[in-house]
Amino acid sequence: MYSVEIKPESGSVQEFERPLTGEVWLQDVVTQSGAAKRFRRMDIEVQRRSANGEWAKMKAEVDRRTKKITIETDYAIHPGDRIVIVQDTSTAIDDVLGPFLGALRGGRR
């Protein structure tokens, strides 16, 4: 089993578990959960229990053009993994202005 947590900006968090049957990749989880259709942008993280019992967090990168997980971060899902999908409400304007506004903020210090 693995668990999925979907967090929209507003509204209730959706949590569910799925059986791990065969080979499952992160992109499969995102597609099957409906998050790719539901959110224009999202932040995705795989949380996996490490040998010392702590949760290791592996951030996935989403190609904003294709809305797919990049091949480098399309992790294989293991038993006990938690997949956390958070709606990202930023826009293309934020992408363009973000570095500029960050530089302005940094310049005021």
Image: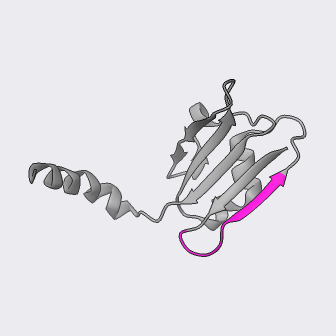
x 69%, y 24%: residue: 51
Q: Is residue 56 magenta?
A: no
**In the displayed structure image, the side of residue 20 where residue 25 appears, left or right:** left
**In the displayed structure image, the side of residue 54 where residue 41 appears, left or right:** left
Q: Quadrant of residue 75?
A: top right
**In the displayed structure image, the side of residue 89 where residue 58 appears, left or right:** right
**Magenta span:** 9-17
List x then y, in percent, for residue 9: 53, 69
Q: Residue furthest left?
A: 108
Q: Quadrant of residue 20?
A: top right
x 68%, y 31%: residue: 53
Foreground pick, 64 / 106 = 106
Q: Would you place residue 1 above or below residue 34 in this image?
A: above
x 38%, y 61%: residue: 92
x 40%, y 64%: residue: 91
Q: Quadrant of residue 79?
A: top right
Q: Would you place residue 1 above or below residue 100 in this image?
A: above
List x then y, in percent, for residue 2: 79, 45
